[in-house]
Amino acid sequence: MSLLVLANIEVRYGRLTAVRGVSLSIKDGDTVFITGPNGAGKSSLLRAIAGVTPASNGTIDFDGYNITGKAPEDIARLGFSMVPEGRDVFGSLTIEENLMVGTGMKAKDRGWKAKRAEDLEAVYQTFPILKERRHGQAGLLSGGQQQMLVIGRALMTNPRLIAIDEPSLGLAPNITDQVYERLIALQSLRALTLLIVEQSSTRANLVGGRMLLMRGGQIVLDGDARELGNSAAVQAAYFGYEDH
Amino acid sequence: MLQIVFDSLSLGSLYALGALGIALIFGVMRLVNFAHGDVIAFSIFALLWPSTDAMAIVFAGQLPWYLLIPFVLLVGAGLSVLCEIVVFRRFRRANPATMMIASFALGFVIRYFLLMLFTSRPKSISLLPMLSQPVEIFGARLPLLQLITIIATVIILIGLTLFLRRTRFGLEMRAAAENFSMARMLGIRANRVIMGAFALSGALAGAIAMIFGSQTGTVDIQMGASIMLMAFIATVIGGLGSLAGAVLAGFLLGAASVIMQVVLPVDARPFRDAFVYGAVILVLLFRPQGLIAARGTKERV
Amino acid sequence: DDDKIVVGFATGASGFMEAYDKPAQDAAMIRIKEINAAGGLLGKQIEVVSADTKSDRAEGAKAGLSVIDEGADLVVVSCDYDFGAPAALAAEDAGLVSFFLCAESVKAGIQGVGKHSFSASVLAAVQGATMSEWAFKEKKAKNFYRLLDTWTEYNKGICDGFDWMMPKLEAQGAKLVGQDTFKNDDASIAAQITRIKSLPKEPDAIMLCTMMPGAVSAIKQIRAAGINSMILNGSGVDGSYWLSAVPDLSNFYTPVQGSIYGDDPNPDVQKFNATYKKETGTDPSSQYVYPGYSMIDVWAKAVTRAKTTEADAVVAELEKMKDEPTLFGPRTFTAELHHQNSARYLIVDIEKGKPSVIGSWTISEPVPMNALVK
Amino acid sequence: MAHLSADNISVAFAGLKALSSVTLDIRPGQISGLIGPNGAGKTTLVNVLTGFQMPTEGSVNLDGKPLTNLKPHQVRRLGIARTFQGGRLFRDLAVIDNLEVTGVGLGMSRRAAVAEAEAMLDWIGISALGGRAAGTLPYTDERRVAIGRALMGRPAFILLDEPAAGMSAQEATDLSSLVKRIARDLGCGVLIIEHNVGLVLGLCDHIVVLDSGAVIEEGTPTEIRQSEKVRHAYMGTAADTALPVAEVLL
Amino acid sequence: MTDASLSTLPPALANPRKPARFALARRTIITPILLSLLILAVAIVTVMTGSRPFNQAMIDIMVRVVLVVGLYIFIGNSGVLSFGHIGFTCLGAYAAAWLTINPLMKKTSLPGLPSFLLEARLPYWQSAIIAALFAGLAALIFGKVLMRLSGIAASIATFAVLAMINTIYSNWESVTGATSSVVGIPIVRVIWPYVGAAIVAIFIAWGHAISRSGLALRAARDEPTAAAASGVDIPKERLIAFAISGVIMGLGGAATAHSIGVVTPDTFYLGLTFITLAMLVVGGMSSLSGAVIGVLLLSALIQALRWLEAGVPLGSTTFALPKGLQEIALGVIMIVILALRPAGLIGNREITLFRVNRNK
Ligand SMILES: Nc1ncnc2c1ncn2[C@@H]1O[C@H](COP(=O)(O)OP(=O)(O)OP(=O)(O)O)[C@@H](O)[C@H]1O
Ligand SMILES: Nc1ncnc2c1ncn2[C@@H]1O[C@H](COP(=O)(O)OP(=O)(O)OP(=O)(O)O)[C@@H](O)[C@H]1O
Ligand SMILES: [Mg+2]
Ligand SMILES: [Mg+2]
């Protein structure tokens, strides 16, 4: 079953069109990597799905609901969790408060407090430094620590689909490994769908799953990550990108 | 001596309440809400019938206190929320200067609206006259109203702090304050949260209006302005975003004003405010981040 | 043109000053109507032009210029000296007579604007002097306390008059037991009250030099603190509209030029009050409506005597007036002073929240120039 | 010869020891790498070197003269430039003006600053961006503009904080060659912080590894690659996968 | 700085080709010229109408242009909102009063003045220059202390300065006449000196904006951290702008004094602070054109509303806004403009002949 269906999405900033006519369908429990050169429109696409930069054209369905033009909070409440590019921590809140921010929408469910404590412990296990600093101010964390925090925070909302814009940004290599391990573990645990933007295809080759390559606001390649590997097609996509 | 302490506290508590209302909105939107003073004035004018006569025609002012107080608080909260919906919502992405000028323009609109209904002439009203009786505690005599004001301020401060620190609403409000769009991406109904903050701030304005109105017996379209200014200053020297700081600074400003009044020789007393503002500058120079720096005001490189 | 005489009002028709300018202007209109009905001035009808100062100084200058452009022979400017001065200066520049509707600062005249400028009211200092002398003489008050609101010149003027009178009274046994200042918009005057309360004995009288809206606040706080001394005021607190704020206020005294409470000893004042009500729909709200009427009255007399509206001639006639009777007491202008430095004041007493005239007082000697210009 | 050194630097933040007795040398023409786990103190060290952070102990010296009490702008005027982990461009200004500001900050006339800014953009290979508003640039370009801005006035030292974060392999390669040119052609002493291990190993003459505020290893790329300590504390699979990129560069 | 022998510096970098002298000035001077022409056009129309109240209204506008341009120099370039500048206007206005009032009058009304001021009686243009410098000096002194602050703390500190100046001037009886109006200032009712002052202010603002200091300050406005890392001494650049804008505000003060002939401290307090700030923000806070156009447009709007309020004949009936609606309408229109254009009408652009240009 398709969890997320995009039809003909277009994103514009004034005169500039960042995403042009992207159509895409992602199945429940899939791992999807989006790669592509700088300025390809990857972040813009994610922001459009999340409802922060509404798409100027096209429709988006999530979990059977039409979420086109819906407010970001409503989309989030359906189980779409997004980690945007750059570290949007709530700098004045403590680390633990940051992790708690997104957990309010489940407050209606039964036993949610116990579940929340469990989730929190799981995040702390993945990133022990966060536990160590749990009452510290988030804004004072180092770049990489903040990145851990925002990933942890997104996981705390217990999403159906988590969309991460460049998870490895600023992370030490071994931490990046841990992040992926955790994501893959969650995926097998409760069919979490992953939508990950990475600049390079290396990680996709390693992890496997579906890989999309974006360029100039369009999806130019769509295939199995391991199969595509460092294939000529991928190379072409990258080198077809005229730098300046 | 004790008398001076009470005098300081009672003046300070007005500033502190004002500072809370301003700090709350500043915390949420980086908005220096210059319309706050006019919300104060509006809340109290709501007790009168519109008329251009010199004599005030009391409308809701004669309600018993247990209805009167909620009425004024509701009017403040309602107007404040209305301002949010009609005006401030459109300025979520604007820079602070733009928002500030917009709030100033809004205050202007409210003020002249009142002026149109009531004229510029101050009107008199007797609110909660029973509070004008003097009471005596620890040998200091002060009007009952002042005592109640002091106590109310402290209770409001504690309640508000607990509310913001301990409840989910507080957490969501602080999150929305810091990064509106990220908060929404985490499922926070940010608009509602912000409306809540405006409601609280408006209710505080109503509280000030009540106290001020009962204390002075006068309602005047300008009445919120000077409190609003002092409150604004208190918010900043208290440490932006820190409610406790705002309250502390409010009390300190009250104390500074009272103490200057007491110690300055009679010829220098008219210059009292210059001394007070001089002290403000000194505090800012030594603690630019405020007396109680809120977390997150320090930005790391 | 020659078939009419133009009176120009450069006053506040909106904004803060409107509440003060409008009533006085209405009173002036009543006098103008009377004159027109009686055949006009020098046989010509008086026509009125007006321009709004928006209660703003820069606008005031424009309003002044605007009525001058429309041919005003007399420029009537805002009640308050500060707000009226720009328009008055414009008139002075154009060589026209200007009248402040009710300014009570000595500068509203020769000392400030120039030699063609007059004020229709009485100097604030006279009010302070009147009240202190009256309280001492009639009420046997000995210990005085002086509480000044530094907000406006008017307030300071009241206290100046008090200060001038005090040494004379002290020679006769009175005493100034203390003094303090505050600002009209102070949220609380608790500290000032504490100072009064710490006196060994409550003063007999507090000379309160202030005006609305701070006055109500100060009075209320003084009484709430349990201080029951008599409170002496300037005319600025006249009116019953605010009395509800301080229920059962007593021992409170105000000097007025005429009574709005229906008990003025002069029946003509009562008649005027009725006319005012008929014309405007409301009773006069304070004694500040009256100067507007006297102003047109004295100016029209001067014009009649000079047989022209030409400024210098009219000024000369005005300066000849000595105890010229008007509805609201005699008026005197001299070449040195275009203002009243002595006046008969009615004293209004408020007891249990009810105002009534309890007498009148004229200070024993006029306030001299050196007490006015310091 | 010019020589920038951090001597025995310690920094503590309210109980947290971000750096303890770190010593580091940077020499003109050399490229030094600074790597280590997240929160190791790398950025903090750069902050100390550039006057943004007062060390609790130790001193920063330029040619033996202490800089420790200088303000950031004074440090910059002595020829020590840096970039930031976030781009921190002057978003409202055009790219060329971003560079010009530094020229002006260093005391050049606007005329001279424009001239140098143009030459610098050209040298980096981004003259085409000159007229764009800095706020609308994509990530990679932002990085390059930031480097260009830091190079104005041709500083003796440049400290780069994660310049390749978020770059694709190709872009990282381009960046590497730019950094090499900076060291070789401009004679700059470069300090580079990066989590892209391949890039660091391929680029640097000398690498310092920080962990929890302390130097745990130091040496040539080969030494670092072989260090068990470093592998344990820091590298994950990336150490293996990234190697090819490094090889390409070498 | 670098050891040249070590590197083989690329020739283009070693010796970059400088642009022609005054290239920047020549490229941008069109903006102040156009703004000045606009102002001149307004003045010429004014003189042609021959109406005295209209002339006075236009004089007011010219004075406002001076004040708002003065604000722009500091606020626009530094991004620090100042609530204190009208304090310098106050200093300028009183200085002009001290220097121009007839000594005979001064001896009675302001006896506390030092004797050189008591004796002084200068022509208005000389007094305006001295008043401007005096205000600038005061700004320099206050700025020296305050410019270490940034953001809202700086705004509040500047407000405290305003409040201090206001309190002192409202109470120093013998020198400022306290709260009462100081009169006797020669009134200048010809528009040209005011036009001159506005044009001078515009050119000074332009000169500052294209100067090194202006550029550095604008950079620091966006990114103080990066600016410091670029060698910019932020407090110093702020101070320069603060002092220059202090001079212009002082000039505006002198102009105000001569335009209405009276000064009082409360003329130079919150009301004027807010209306000038509003004009700046509505026009576009970070652009000189925005400052000037903000004044012209808002003033025109205010004037139009007043005119509507006074009543406009429409055929046989007169259409008039109810009293008080003018201010309400003004507030609403300001809110609408800001909601639609949060960066102000002009944004951060400058007008030029060919197209609207991005700010340098
Ligand atoms: N807020 C914005 N305003 C104007 N243009 C923008 C904005 N955000 C992005 N763009 C432009 O849209 C295009 C796509 O940007 P986007 O950030 O989506 O690319 P990306 O693929 O995520 O690149 P990167 O790998 O650098 O993150 C780029 O040309 C960029 O300059
Ligand atoms: N101003 C500060 N106040 C408190 N703690 C701080 C401050 N600055 C840094 N720290 C802490 O010091 C430690 C070192 O931070 P630093 O930013 O130097 O790490 P880093 O090595 O650059 O990490 P990353 O690779 O994640 O960017 C971190 O634990 C961080 O939380
Ligand atoms: Mg991106
Ligand atoms: Mg770092």
Image (cartoon, rainbow, N blue to C red):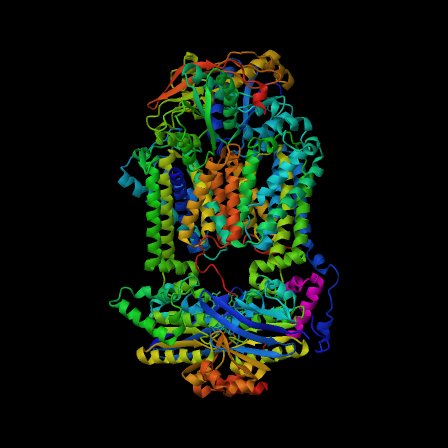
The answer to whether C238 is drawn above or below residue A192 in the figure is above
Residue closer to the observer: E52 or B99: B99
Q: Residue at x 43, y 65 (%)?
A: A138
Residue D103 forms part of the magenta stretch: yes
The answer to whether E334 is drawn above or below residue D187 in the figure is above
Query: For residue C187, which quarter of the picture?
Result: top left
The answer to whether A153 is drawn above or below residue A236 in the figure is above
Residue span colored magenta: D96-125
Residue closer to the observer: C4 or A80: A80
Left or right: B278 as drawn, with respect to E203 = left
Q: Residue at x 54, y 40 (%)?
A: E269
Residue E308 forms part of the magenta stretch: no
Q: Position of residue A1 (x, y in %)?
A: 32, 78
Prevalent SS, magenta region: helix
Q: Position of residue E206 (x, y in %)?
A: 66, 52
Residue C14 visible (yes or no) = yes
